[in-house]
Amino acid sequence: MPTYRDEAVVLRTHKLGEADRIVTMLSREHGKIRAVAKGVRRTASKFGARLEPFMVADIQCYIGRSLDIIQQAETLGSYGSEITADYASYTAASVMVETADKVTDDDGSLQQYLLLVGALRSLSRREHNPSLTLDSYLLRSLSIAGWAPSFVDCAVTGAPGPHSVFVAQLGGVVADEVAPPGSPRLSADTLELLGALLSGTWDVAEAADERSRSQASGVVAAYTQFHLERSLRSIQHVDRSA
């Protein structure tokens, strides 16, 4: 049987039969992979713990008719236990892997893979506020997928900003003359925070006040769910109190 080897981050798992699991992963070179991990639900399994959500592993698979079969798995990034130990980090990571599952396909994206692994690593190390890490991840993931938002110039006409009216359906902030009636306006501080989250300017992001963070999170959630054209089940459980 033909085999292949790759690095992959585990997005989700499903039970299969009495002892097996179907593991959905985003890999570095082979896109999104759905493969069977045989016997991993048995206590004697050698690599069951290496194939839990948020873990990064070096995997070897052989190609099956409908699903590939995982033969080996060696841990590269053991982020699961650190993330699940903190509820805010866990809920943020859950949204990240669900988003990655929706924005990638079998062809995959190296940029999406690297972004997700970096975000999970950051969560596990408590480098930044989990809510900020999540919002930054979502904005960057959407940008890689081709939906980069504008937070300065008008997303419709290109008129130089700053503009304060934000319309998710139109791609970001828009000039007053093209803004639909009743569209929400964002404060200058919120727009600065959103730009910092998109660019990864963490000193600016972490200096933002609570009101700006709350408004920015609402904008990011609305923008994400509009472009994914479906709701994220995990986003309603995100802990924004940290």
Image (tube, grey):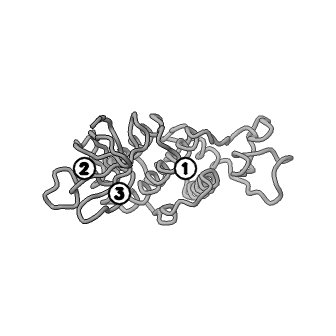
The residues tagged by marks 1 and 2 sit, at their Cα atoms, a distance apart of 37 Å
Q: Position of residue 31 (x, y in %)?
A: 43, 39
Q: Position of residue 237 (x, y in %)?
A: 47, 66
User: Earlier along the polypeptide chain: callout 1 or callout 3?
Assistant: 3
Please, is residue 4 above or below residue 33 in the view?
above
Q: Which residue is mark 2?
A: 50
Q: Position of residue 23 (x, y in %)?
A: 34, 52
| In contact (CB < 8 Å): disc 2 and disc 3 | no
* Left or right, residue 84 beside residue 151: left
Q: Which residue is mark 1?
A: 208
| In contact (CB < 8 Å): disc 1 and disc 2 | no
User: Earlier along the polypeptide chain: callout 2 or callout 3?
Assistant: 3
The kind of residue on which mark 1 rests is Ala
* Left or right, residue 90 beside residue 218: left
In the image shown, does 70 or 53 lie closer to the viewer? 70
The quarter of the image holding the C terminus is bottom left
Instruction: Let me know if residue 212 appears in the view.
Output: no
The structure residue drawn at horizontal position 47% and vertical position 42%, both measured from the top left corner, is: 106
Q: Secondary structure at mark 2?
A: helix
Q: Which residue is mark 3?
A: 13
In the image shown, does 183 or 185 lie closer to the viewer? 183
Q: Secondary structure at mark 1?
A: loop
Q: Nearer the viewer, mark 1 or mark 3?
A: 3
Q: Position of residue 186 (x, y in %)?
A: 69, 53
